[in-house]
């Protein structure tokens, strides 16, 4: 297509585009550029450094808050978070042991049935 | 719709927009009927009900330790599980559950050598087969690789890896958490279980404008134009907002081994003293990457192909994002059929001695 052809086509497109659509297009372009700029920003080393510090601060604040409330609850002679976690951990370990016992039992059963089948073959 | 009509519709649209946001927690997700096969601690193995199983080799779906595996079965009509069942597969799913503080001592070795290994044993027992296909997505793919690399003579016939991080050099996550100043021990010890919301926040921060603004702006415009896909938006939004915590030990190991030391590629990752040797992986392998994936970019997955010893390797590089690739509106026509076809071709005969010996790139 010639240059004139391109211009005609562009004009035809322009004529079809309403001001509202044009505004929307301009806005979307701006948003795309902003998004790209932010992605570049978060990809910088300095942002990584900031994020590392911010995460540590968040962890510290969460830990302080949790420990404080846990202390208050335990001083009221109620089961605190740590107590419940300790209990749940004991249950989880019991479940681990039960799973291992079940596996061992299955292994013994399987070995037993193989030995039984072998003995029957020898007798027969 | 002209400007006046749009203006008149604005109040109604505002109510609808608010309603969509407020009721997203009630969206229907993961409703394909399934039965519990096995449980251990927070892990549950499910088997999806089906009366049209035609492929003898079952498929075990493994998702990441962040977010929920519901994405495999997002909503009726847009569910990968539903699609696999329609194609005649016997589908199992291992769900890691919602770890809590008592699970802070769960490490990657527990997930790979206990939960996954025992889950595989239960899958084989439930369907009476000797082999299965393992389909891992994101960290679930890496866990599948760890299993394949650590457990010799395992019963995995086919391995499908979707947007799986392998080599993390140069990734945005690597720049954030791989740096020395990011004290992973402090974070892990401080939290016990790293809150899912913190991980979600970090994920969204990778594309801040898109995640915190564009999504809502697009929804608003769709509502205003009367073209909003309420169910599609709500189910995805509900899935994104559902963030289980990450057990501290697993988090510490994941960040240190994968992002700070890149051990998987360097070949010095050990699970319970056993070296994870990716060369042990000789299964039929399908590796799917998404071109616009910022979490597990394709260049971070491709190095795997040089490390495994599989002879039958297929690589699918497709456009799309980390999740959109498999759960987007085009997934049903553009990627699921390819995965199902690849699996179907390799789900009929025993693996050993019957490999195709092809390396295909698409």
Image (cartoon, coloured by chain):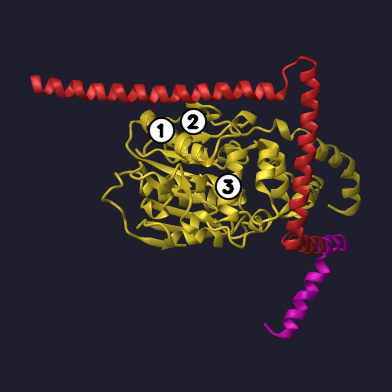
Chain colours: A red, B yellow
Give the residue at mark 2. B45
Q: Which residue: 75% across, 84% down?
A: A4
Mark 2, other Cα within 10 Å: few <14 / some 14–19 / many ≥20:
many
Q: Which residue: 80% across, 29% down?
A: A68
* Frontmost residue, B35 versus A41: A41
Badge 3: chain ID: B
Query: Would you place residue A123 above or below residue B109 in this image?
Result: above
Q: CA distance from mark 1 to mark 3?
A: 26 Å
On the image, the x and y values in percent for residue B144 come to 47, 45
Using the rendered image of the protein, determine whether residue B115 is visible from the camera's viewpoint.
yes
Query: Would you place residue A122 above or below residue B149 in this image?
Result: above
| Label 2 in the same subunit as label 1 | yes
On the image, the x and y values in percent for residue B163 come to 55, 52
| Label 1 in the same subunit as label 3 | yes
**Residue span colored magenta:** A1-27
How many numbered discs?
3
| Residue extending farthest left | A124
Q: CA distance from mark 2 to mark 1?
A: 8 Å
Q: Which mark is residue B207?
A: none
Q: Is residue B322 left or right of residue B190?
A: left
Residue contact between numbered discs 2 and 1, judged by CB atoms under 8 Å: yes
Residue contact between numbered discs 1 and 3, judged by CB atoms under 8 Å: no
Give the residue at mark 3. B254
Please tell me whether mark 2 sits on a helix, a strand or a loop: strand
Badge 2: chain ID: B
Residue B232 in magenta stretch: no
Q: CA distance from mark 3 to mark 2?
A: 23 Å
Name the magenta segment's main secondary structure: helix
On the image, the x and y values in percent for residue B269 come to 48, 51
Give the residue at mark 1. B123
Q: Which residue: 29% across, 21% down?
A: A109
């Amino acid at each position: 297509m010639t240059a004139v052809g391109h211009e005609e086509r562009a004009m035809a497109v322009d004529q079809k585009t309403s001001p509202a659509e044009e505004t929307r297009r301009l806005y979307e372009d701006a948003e795309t550029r902003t998004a790209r700029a932010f992605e570049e920003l978060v990809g910088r080393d300095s942002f990584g450094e900031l994020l590392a510090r911010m995460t540590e601060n968040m962890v510290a604040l969460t830990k302080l808050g949790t420990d404080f409330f846990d202390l208050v609850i335990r001083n009221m002679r109620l089961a605190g978070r740590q107590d419940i976690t300790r209990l749940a951990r004991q249950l989880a370990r019991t479940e681990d042991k039960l799973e291992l016992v079940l596996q061992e039992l299955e292994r013994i059963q399987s070995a037993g049935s193989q030995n039984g089948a072998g003995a029957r073959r020898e007798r027969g | 719709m002209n400007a006046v009509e749009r203006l008149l519709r604005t109040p109604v649209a505002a109510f609808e927009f608010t309603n969509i946001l407020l009721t997203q927690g009630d969206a229907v997700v993961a409703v394909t009927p399934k039965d519990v096969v096995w449980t251990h601690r927070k892990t549950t193995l499910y088997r999806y009900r089906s009366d049209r199983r035609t492929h003898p080799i079952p498929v075990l779906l493994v998702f990441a330790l962040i977010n929920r595996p519901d994405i495999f079965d997002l909503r009726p009509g847009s569910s990968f599980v539903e699609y696999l069942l329609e194609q005649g597969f016997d589908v199992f799913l291992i769900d890691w559950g919602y770890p809590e503080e008592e699970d802070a001592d769960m490490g990657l070795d527990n997930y790979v050598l206990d939960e996954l290994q025992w889950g595989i044993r239960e899958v084989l027992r439930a369907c009476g087969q000797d082999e299965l296909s393992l389909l891992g997505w994101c960290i679930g793919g890496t866990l599948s690789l760890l299993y394949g690399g650590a457990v010799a003579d395992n019963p995995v016939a086919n391995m499908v890896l979707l947007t799986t991080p392998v080599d993390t050099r140069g990734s945005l996550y690597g720049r954030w958490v791989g740096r020395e100043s990011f004290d992973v021990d402090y974070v892990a010890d401080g939290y016990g279980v790293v809150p899912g919301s913190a991980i979600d926040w970090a994920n969204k921060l990778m594309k801040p404008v898109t995640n915190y603004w564009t999504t809502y702006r697009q929804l608003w415009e769709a509502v205003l134009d009367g073209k909003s896909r309420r169910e599609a938006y709500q189910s995805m939004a509900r899935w994104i907002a559902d963030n289980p915590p990450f057990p501290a030990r697993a988090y510490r190991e994941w960040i240190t081994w994968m992002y700070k030391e890149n051990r998987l590629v360097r070949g010095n990752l050990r699970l319970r003293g056993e070296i994870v040797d990716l060369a042990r992986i000789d299964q039929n392998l399908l590796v799917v990457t998404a071109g616009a994936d910022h979490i597990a970019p394709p260049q971070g997955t491709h190095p795997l192909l040089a490390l495994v010893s599989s002879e039958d390797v297929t690589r699918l590089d497709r456009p799309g994002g980390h999740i959109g690739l498999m759960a987007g509106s085009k997934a049903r026509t553009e990627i699921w059929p390819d995965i199902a076809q690849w699996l179907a071709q390799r789900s009929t005969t025993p693996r050993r001695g019957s490999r195709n010996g092809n390396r295909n790139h698409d």
